[in-house]
Amino acid sequence: MIIAVDGTLASGKGTVARGLARHFGLPHLDTGALYRAVAVAVLSAGGDPRDPETARAAARALDPSAIAENAIRTAEAGAAASVVAVQQGVRDALFDLQKRFAEQPGGAVLDGRDIGTVVCPHADVKFYVDADPAVRAERRWRELAARGDTVSLEEIRRQLDERDRRDSSRETAPLMRAEDAILLDTTHLSIDATLAEAVRIVQNKTDAAPRT
């Protein structure tokens, strides 16, 4: 069983994907972490994320098992990830990795921005997770503040608007809802309520049962 979870930044898609993976006993891949890791690798080496050759080389050399979670979750890493993610060389380098993960025996849960449309167009269940931009900005600001990042809420709003525009308008694999993806609007839903709804939908669509 392959479950694709796409959506906007700070909408809750990662939380939904991780929860589904735990519930159904499936491996989970946060594909956004791959692009963040590429961006961090470029920045750490003093490179420019906008340089296609530098970004592609970093993507080809990426070791998913060596990704430093704290380093990739900063506002700077997120902004740079959006820059490298529009580059075809980077996407090509990471595409095969994502496909192999999805097609492993038993299936998997993947979340990102083009899982249901590009990486796993034949996924058994597809979700598109979204929320009001103001709500997403505050969630992201609180998340970063909890990690010690001093970025302002106003700056987060600006970055989120810029990220949404870039991700939705890029020529390669733009952020969009697949035609057969089920919308989960988390604006007024708690994490528990959102996950419960997602689990119910998967079970109804696949007659799947939790693995113990």
Image: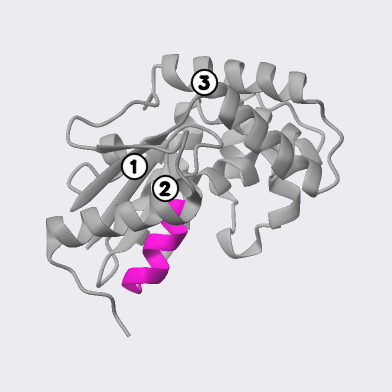
The residue that mark 1 highlights is: 115
In front of the other: 211 or 44: 211
* Lower sequence index among marks 3 and 2: 2
Give the residue number, with chain letter if any, for mark 2: 111
Residue 77 in the image, given as x and y percentages of width and height: 70, 37
Tell me which numbered mark, 3 or 1, is placed earlier along the sequence: 1
Residue numbers of the magenta segment: 15-25
The reply to whether callout 3 and callout 1 are in contact (CB within 8 Å) is no
Visible residue check, residue 54: no
- State the residue at coordinates (25%, 45%): 126
Q: Position of residue 180 (x, y in %)?
A: 17, 36
- Residue 107 higher or lower than 72, as above or below: below
Percent position of residue 25, x then y: 35, 74
Judge by depth and name the residue closer to the eye, 29 or 44.
29
* Residue under the image location 82 percent in, 34 percent down: 46
Q: Label 3 is placed on what type of residue?
A: Asp
In the rendered image, the quadrant that contains the N terminus is bottom left
Q: What residue is at 29 percent from the left and 80 percent from the top? A: 211
